[in-house]
Image (cartoon, grey):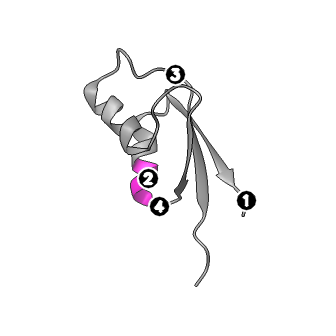
Amino acid sequence: MAAEKTIKVTQIKSGIGTKPKHRGTLRALGLRRIGHSNELPDRPEIRGMIARVPHLITVEEVAK
């Protein structure tokens, strides 16, 4: 079985003042504060969450 691709998601802007759904999405991605990063599997569910808050995060592919 091939290893799953991984992506690194980093919060670059605050969730304060955003819609409650955006704050919930940040929390679901495992982000708590500006500068905090999390490595997640590159799956459609995760990509959908990323598409909801692209203005608050940066995404980079992790080579393993």
Which corner quadrant holds the N terminus? bottom right
Residue 31 appears left or right of 1: left
* Figure quadrant of the C terminus: bottom right
| Figure quadrant of residue 44 | bottom left
Tag 2–tag 4 contact (CB < 8 Å): yes
The magenta-colored residue range is: 44-48
Q: Is residue 24 magenta?
A: no
Q: CA distance from mark 3 to mark 2?
A: 19 Å
Instruction: State the residue at coordinates (44%, 41%).
Output: 51
- Disc 4 or 3, which lies upstream in sequence? 3
What number is the disc on residue 43?
4
Query: What amino acid does circle 2 point to?
Result: Ile
Q: Position of residue 11 (x, y in %)?
A: 53, 31
Disc number for residue 63:
1
Residue drawn 56% across and 34% down? Answer: 36
How far, Cα to Cα, is label 3 from label 1?
25 Å
Tell me, for residue 46, which label it has, or none. Answer: 2
Label 1: few (<14), some (14–19) or many (≥20) C-alpha neighbours in 10 Å: few
Label 2: few (<14), some or many (≥20) within 10 Å? some
Q: Residue furthest left?
A: 20
